[in-house]
Image: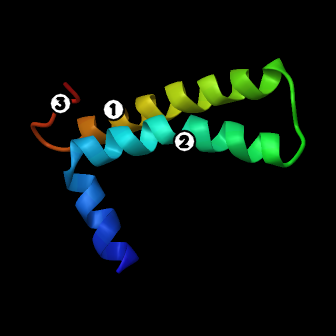
């Protein structure tokens, strides 16, 4: 079942964008719940957001004839 969901996400640009945008939010919430506070938490979330978008566009560029936007 999980394999089917991941395969579907590989073909769905909206799902990829949702994952990349939710990753920093989940990171902030998880760190806050674990008791970590401070500006570095938000800086880490920004790095995670930018990194995930770069990774997504790099993986999309590997596909033949595919572009990010």
Q: Nearer the viewer, residue 47 or 22?
A: 22
Q: Contact, CB < 8 Å: mark 3 with mark 1?
A: no
Residue under label 1? 57
The disc placed on residue 22 is: none
The disc placed on residue 23 is: 2
Q: Is residue 10 above or below residue 23?
A: below
Give the image quarter of residue 42.
top right
- Residue in view at x 45 percent, y 35 percent: 21
Give the image quarter of residue 46.
top right
Q: Contact, CB < 8 Å: mark 1 with mark 2?
A: no
Q: Secondary structure at mark 2?
A: helix
- Residue in view at x 81 percent, y 18 percent: 39
Q: Secondary structure at mark 3?
A: loop
- Residue in view at x 73 percent, y 47 percent: 30
Disc 1 packing (10 Å; few <14; some 14–19; many ≥20): some
Of discs 3 and 2, which sits in the foreground? 2
**Residue 40 picture location, percent across and down:** 80, 23
Which of the two labelled residues, at mark 3 and mark 2, occupies the earlier sequence position? 2
Mark 3–mark 2 Cα distance, whole angstroms, equals: 22 Å
Q: Is residue 55 left or right of residue 29?
A: left
Q: Nearer the viewer, residue 40 or 66?
A: 40
Considering the image in quadrants, where does the N terminus appear? bottom left
């Amino acid at each position: 079942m999980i394999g089917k969901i991941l395969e579907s996400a590989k073909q769905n640009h909206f799902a990829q964008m949702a994952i990349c945008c939710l990753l920093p939010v989940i990171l902030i919430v998880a760190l806050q719940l674990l008791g970590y506070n401070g500006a570095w938490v938000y800086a880490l979330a920004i790095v995670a957001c930018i990194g995930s978008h770069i990774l997504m566009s790099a993986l999309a560029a590997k596909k033949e004839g595919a572009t990010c936007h």
